[in-house]
Amino acid sequence: MRFDPPRLKSDDERILPLINVVFLLLIFFMLTGKLSTIDPIEVAPPTSASEKAAETRELVVVLGADGQLAFDGAMIDEETLKTALAERMEMAPSAQVRLKADGAADSTDVIALMETLHEAGVERLKLLTLPAGGAE
């Protein structure tokens, strides 16, 4: 009985399963990855000893270290912020506002902004911080 020698596989046939696995991993990470919005102002939030994570995002006000304000991803001045928030709070009175302030921002600016938010009708406000462990 005569046996033919085994046929040598080409390089393309050997690499095809690897390509399939790489594409499957790519699709998996694209579907499960977390997308986040980019703030118009770069901020470094202060740290907090509380480890409770923020639930869902609703209304986010961003305060930069230099006092710049952003709301809904756009730069805004204090008076426009107050009127825009008043309109949003009128539509959804139980909405929660999240304040993301830079850790280097002056505390009097943060308190003044909190008072402005209260005047606009905000009843529930959360100050976003980072855990004290130095996480980014």
Image: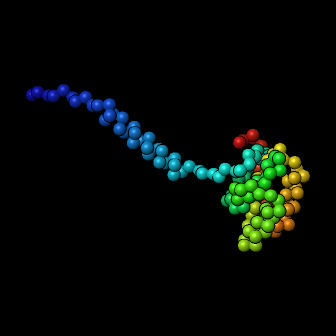
- Side of 80 where 3 appears, left or right: left
The residue under the point 70% across, 59% down is 72
**As displayed, is residue 39 above or below residue 14?**
below
| Residue 134 falls in image quadrant | top right
The residue under the point 36% across, 39% down is 17
The residue under the point 79% across, 63% down is 80
Counting from the top left corner in percent of width and height, residue 81 is at 79, 62
Q: In this orientation, which residue lies closer to the viewer: 130 or 45? A: 45
Residue 49 seen from this side: no
Which residue is at the far left?
1
In the picture, which quadrant includes the C terminus? Answer: top right
Q: In this orientation, which residue lies closer to the viewer: 55 or 105? A: 105
The residue under the point 40% across, 39% down is 19
**As displayed, is residue 106 above or below residue 113?**
above
Q: In this orientation, which residue lies closer to the viewer: 77 or 16? A: 77
In the picture, which quadrant includes the N terminus? Answer: top left
Counting from the top left corner in percent of width and height, residue 131 is at 75, 45
Counting from the top left corner in percent of width and height, residue 55 is at 68, 58
| Residue 10 falls in image quadrant | top left
- Give the colouring mode of the picture: rainbow
